[in-house]
Every structure is written in structure tokens, then in C-alpha cells.
Image (tube, grey):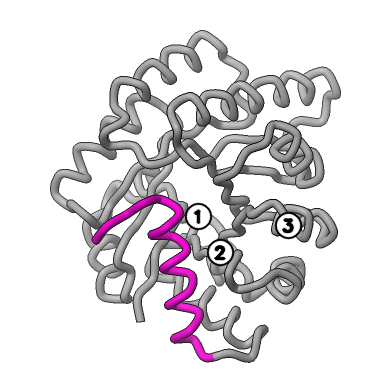
Amino acid sequence: MRFVDVHCHIMDECFDNDREEVLMRAKKSNVIAIISCAFSKDEAMKTIKLMNSHKNFLFLTCGWDSTNFDINTLTEYQSFIVNNLDVIIGIGEVGLDYYYIRDSSLRNKQKEIFISWIAFAKKVNLPIIVHSRNAGDDAIELLISENVKRVILHAFDGKISWAKKAVENGFFFSIPPSIVRSSQKQQLVKNIPLESIMLESDAPVLSPYANQRNEPANLIYSAKMISELKNINIELVSEITTQNALSFFNILL
């Protein structure tokens, strides 16, 4: 078996004391690629440096915290991305967060920023990884209206009806290890085809165990639960989700 972690935050400070050990545990757990999200130029540069010692294993996407409204910094960050497209394989996570942002005017501003990132992803011809906490319907509606083609909805917590619309539009869903304790994630997996699924850790969060640090090695929990829910063997889950990820990001290993 082999697995791809399509979304995590390996540069999070909680990994500062044992980052290399975390990466080694992932490799020993059949993880063949980790795609890490950076929220800033500084974080992206640190990731690129780490990638140099983990070639063809660690990859970079550049995203934006949905609660960040600093447009000047956003513009500078996008300029950095344009100048480093040779080492960046995706835009994200970007999107909407209605859990933290409750004010309607700020939510509208959030949408504007999300749309700007959608346009930017098209401009640089990269796929987009979408954050949509408590905002699944608005996020999917925006993606469809903007005619986006290459989409991963990460840790999707929205309604099944909207998930099915996303599948109809060719979007993918990445499933974290927290599925083992989330009835919502379990219902999501039951209602979408395996061909629309990838695996993610979202490390250091969304662990299979509440209030514990998560890491990429835990993808096995996602795969096992998907195999149980769909009554298929875990080898097939591994094969399809891995191929989905490698094809989506055009990764050649």
C-alpha cells in the first residue's frame, strides 16, 4: 500500500522539535508524498528549504488564512508565488470560514478575497485546495460560478446535497483521520464515490484521537475507515486515492 497526504501543515511550530522524525514515521507508514500548505512567504521559504532534503517526497502549496484581511501582504505573497512557480504545485488552502467570521460584511470581504485567489489560481494554472468551514454551500456555489475545474475540498463539513453537486462538477474531497470520530465525515464518504476521494492529515489538527497532535503517518486511519464504510479492501482505497492525488497534482515519483 502507498498513501499521499494531500494537505497538511508540516511547518507548524508544534513540529519544531521533531519534524524530521515526523517525516520518517510517515515514510515508514507507506506515505510516499506529503503536500504541505504555507500561509506566508516566510513559511513557504522554510518549506522549500526542507524540500531540498526530501526531494520527491515533500511538496508545497501556498494558501491564505481565511481570517486574514491584509490585502497588502496578500499581494506581496502572490508576487512571491509567481516568482516560485517551479516549486509550487497548488494554491491553497484558501476559502471561507464562517465559524470564526460571523459578521456579514466581513464574510462578504472573505468572499472577495476567495474569488481573487480563484482568479489567481487560474492565472498561474494551478489546482486549488479549498477551506470551507461552516461555509460549504457558499464555497461550492462560488467555485461552480467561477468555472473552476481542479478543486479539492479539504476536511469538508458541509451538507451531502452540496457535496454531490461538487462531485458532479469533478471536485475532489480529502478525508482526514478524524473521520474515525466524525459522523459527518462518515456520511460524506458513504455518499461520494471513491473516485472523488483523496487522503489528508491536516496535521497537526484533525487527529484520530481528540486533543492529540496529528501527523501524516495517521493517513492509515482515514484509509481503514473508508474501506469499512464502502465495504472494499484497503488496498483499493490506497490505490485509487493515491492515483487521484498524483494525477491531480501532476506528480511523477
Query: Residue visible at 24% across and 37% down?
Result: 48
Q: Earlier in the sequence, mark 1 or mark 2?
A: 2
CB of mark 3 within 8 Å of CB of mark 2?
A: no
Q: Which mark's residue is nearer the viewer, 3 or 1?
A: 3
What residue span does the magenta drawing correspond to? 233-253
Indicate the position of residue 95 as horizontal and vertical percent values.
64, 35
At which x and y percent is residue 86? 26, 33
Q: Which residue is mark 1?
A: 202
Which residue in the protein does label 2 denote?
176
Between 11 and 111, the one nearer to me in the picture: 111
Marks 1 & 2, CB-CB < 8 Å contact: yes
Disc 2 secondary structure class: loop
Q: Which residue is mark 3?
A: 168
Mark 3: few/some/many CA within 10 Å (<14, 14-19, 20+) = few
Q: Write the residue at 34% across / 42% down.
A: 60
**What is the chief secondary structure element of the magenta stretch?**
helix
Is 48 magenta? The answer is no
Farthest residue in the top direction? 72
